[in-house]
């Protein structure tokens, strides 16, 4: 019996209203009714987003008689159609105005669509192949030059370039290929017989050749780490450019990125790498690493996840944490950035963690499990109550690499563990159990890492970097901040004396309180979120003046004038020594450091 086929058609019906239309042609079937549902979350982004809320209208017709069929909505994301087993067509309109890499968005320049936010699944035909036609409206001259780009396999090409045709083996594959329809710049480069395509929304003066040149060794590193046969022959870096915005979401054969357009190098500019450009390269590194580690090596519960509701795992520290370690490290290993720059980036990640008092309350295993609520739905108190499985997970990976090298006399490393994960779990997409790290290390390296994991993964201890980094020619230190803008790493300017204890941003008058850190002066004085600090001891302040006045204070307290919900208040701020919460490294033995970066 041949496989049944569901024919989907996607049309940009009204970009001015941020709407697109989807139709599904469903063949005759053996059930009286059809159940259609949209996922409530997208793999790789662990928050229920209820994509079905954007479906504006839905109707069903018999394909032969063209008569309307009853379509009843059963819950927030499910419809039941009374098809009586006959071939039918479902048509619905979707509102697409979420400029992110998780949902769908249409404006005058392009449309971007994730399958999870666009294509209803037909439950009774869950094993059917999915064909897709993308159609541009003939009457709209504005979209006349638009093109369709996706990593989805091409079924056939239409000469008119008004429609494109794709196919997938089943629904899970179908929703894993984001689709870009619009004006774009593209640039291709090859690495070890894998073709990479850079796609950037709009027409830009960005130096694509330079980006390709910098990404080439990064991609080569990941390909070499996991070895042949490669899981991809073609890979698409799809970047939505915006004035502001940041994000990345992995897929099997592509990644969708969101990035500020003017943070990328322009044609004719110097070859100096800005911090923002380095961050973009690290983001690309991170998402391409997920091709192996998340899309194919994954927790058992994520092999066939239930996209209708939360799917819980305490392993995200392994997946996002390890990837966060490799994304920056790869740039240093391949000479894209200098070792000292990498050490500063690593120190900044550690500094961010040291300022996060929540690391003492929540383990990264708990953080992984609670990603759906506490991590993805953070409020301003998050820094005091939760820990990031990205940030601490990356530092745990760093410590685990050093521990494995130390215990094996430098014969095995985290690279060795990643290769085992790929060989035993990724190649056949066999999900990992919670105990996978300790089991592989014990069985293949004869190294018991469980005491380490109990402390830093299942407990809330910091990674003891001072005891480990000497192995690679470094010493680890902490210092006080130098300013409100200080992110950590090695600096030449003087440290502050006294710490305010809150994150502030400029307001039309004074400074708005964005975060208040537990145990520091601002919280002790009763300063609250969204307060507007306007003066210290009667002097109107900006960020620089506030710090200068704090450091020069000779009394035990100073008076802070602030506005809270339209009321003018004065509070006494205690003057306390600045906390040593900024990390940095010193190079003790450059030969050992270089050996670690190249080994």
Image (tube, rainbow, N blue to C red):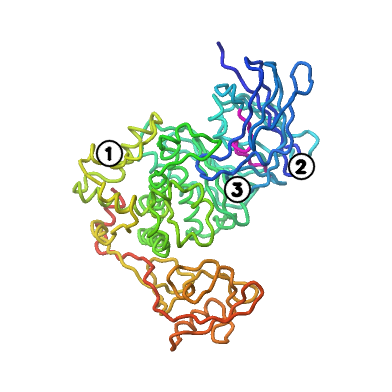
Above or below for 197 versus 34: below
Name the element at disc 1: helix
Q: Do labels 1 and 2 touch, CB within 8 Å?
A: no
Instruction: Estimate the x, y position of residue 429 in percent, counting from the top left.
Output: 41, 31
**The disc label shown at residue 100, or none:** 3
Q: Earlier in the sequence, mark 3 or mark 1?
A: 3
Q: Earlier in the sequence, mark 1 or mark 2?
A: 2
Q: Which residues are magenta?
A: 110-121
Q: State the SS at label 2.
A: helix
Q: Where residue 553 sits in the image (x, y, percent)?
A: 45, 86
Q: Residue at x 39, y 42 (%)?
A: 222
Label 3 element class: loop
Which residue is drawn at the image coordinates 39% and 28% (left, top)?
Answer: 428
The reply to whether the C-beta atoms of the residues labelled 2 and 3 are less than 8 Å apart is no
Residue 475: x and y in percent read: 27, 64
Residue 397 at least partly seen: no
Q: Is residue 217 found inside the magenta-colored segment of the image?
A: no
Q: Residue furthest left?
A: 409
Residue to which mark 1 is pinned: 439
Q: Residue at x 35, y 40 (%)?
A: 434
Nearer the observer: mark 1 or 2; the answer is: 1
The quarter holding residue 166 reads top right
Q: Is residue 191 visible?
A: yes
User: How many neighbours does mark 1 have within 10 angstroms: few (below 14), some (14-19), or many (20 or more)?
Assistant: some
Front one among 157 and 477 = 477
What is the number of the mark on residue 142?
A: 2
């Amino acid at each position: 019996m041949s496989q049944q086929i569901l024919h989907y058609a996607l049309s940009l019906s009204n970009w001015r209203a941020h709407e697109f239309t989807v139709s599904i042609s469903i063949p005759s079937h053996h059930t009286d009714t059809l159940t259609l549902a949209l996922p409530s979350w997208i793999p790789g982004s662990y928050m229920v987003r209820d994509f079905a809320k954007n479906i504006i209208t839905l109707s069903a017709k018999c394909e032969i008689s063209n008569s309307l069929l009853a379509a009843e909505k059963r819950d927030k994301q499910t419809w039941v159609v009374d098809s009586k087993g006959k071939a039918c067509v479902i048509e619905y309109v979707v509102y697409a105005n979420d400029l992110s890499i998780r949902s769908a968005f249409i404006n005058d320049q392009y449309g971007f669509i994730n399958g999870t936010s666009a294509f209803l699944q037909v439950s009774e035909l869950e094993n059917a192949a999915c064909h897709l036609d993308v159609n541009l409206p003939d009457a709209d001259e504005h979209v006349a030059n638009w093109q369709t780009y996706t990593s989805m396999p091409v079924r056939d090409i239409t000469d008119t370039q008004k429609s494109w045709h794709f196919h997938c083996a089943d629904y899970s594959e179908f929703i894993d290929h984001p689709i870009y329809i619009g004006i774009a710049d593209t640039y291709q480069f090859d690495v070890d017989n894998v073709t990479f395509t850079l796609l950037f929304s709009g027409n830009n003066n960005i130096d694509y050749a330079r980006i390709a040149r910098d990404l080439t060794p990064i991609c080569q590193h990941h390909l070499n780490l996991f070895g042949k046969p490669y899981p991809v022959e073609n890979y698409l870096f799809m970047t939505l450019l915006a004035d502001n915005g940041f994000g990345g979401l992995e897929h099997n054969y592509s990644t969708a990125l969101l990035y500020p357009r003017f943070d990328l190098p322009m044609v004719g500019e110097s070859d100096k790498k800005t911090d923002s450009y380095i961050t973009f390269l690290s983001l690309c590194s991170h998402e391409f690493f997920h091709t192996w580690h998340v899309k194919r090596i994954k927790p058992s519960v994520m092999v066939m996840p239930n996209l209708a509701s939360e799917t819980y795992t305490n392993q995200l520290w392994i997946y996002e944490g390890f990837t966060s370690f490799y994304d920056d490290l790869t740039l240093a290993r391949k000479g894209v950035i200098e070792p000292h720059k990498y050490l500063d980036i690593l120190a900044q990640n550690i500094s961010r963690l040291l300022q996060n008092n929540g690391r003492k309350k929540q383990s990264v295993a708990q953080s992984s499990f609670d990603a759906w609520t506490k991590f993805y739905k953070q409020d301003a108190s998050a820094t005091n109550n939760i820990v990031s499985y990205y940030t601490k997970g990356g530092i745990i990976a760093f410590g685990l690499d050093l521990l494995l090298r130390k215990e094996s006399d430098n014969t095995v490393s985290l690279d060795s563990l990643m290769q085992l994960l790929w060989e035993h779990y990724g190649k056949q997409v066999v999900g990992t159990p919670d105990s996978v790290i300790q089991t592989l290390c014990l069985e293949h390296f004869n190294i018991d890492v469980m005491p380490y994991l109990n402390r830093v993964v299942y407990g809330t201890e910091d990674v003891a970097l001072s005891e480990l980094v000497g192995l690679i020619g470094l010493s680890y230190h902490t210092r006080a901040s130098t300013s409100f803008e200080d992110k950590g790493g090695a600096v030449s300017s003087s440290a502050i004396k006294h710490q305010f204890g809150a994150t502030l941003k400029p307001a039309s008058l004074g400074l708005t309180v964005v975060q208040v850190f537990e145990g520091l002066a601002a919280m002790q004085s009763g300063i609250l979120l969204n307060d507007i600090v306007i003066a210290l001891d009667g002097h109107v302040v900006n960020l620089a003046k506030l710090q200068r006045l704090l450091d020069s204070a000779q009394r035990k307290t100073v008076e802070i004038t602030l506005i809270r919900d339209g009321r003018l208040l004065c509070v006494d701020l205690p003057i306390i020594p600045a906390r040593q919460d900024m990390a940095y490294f010193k190079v003790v033995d450059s030969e050992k450091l270089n050996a670690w970066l190249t080994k």
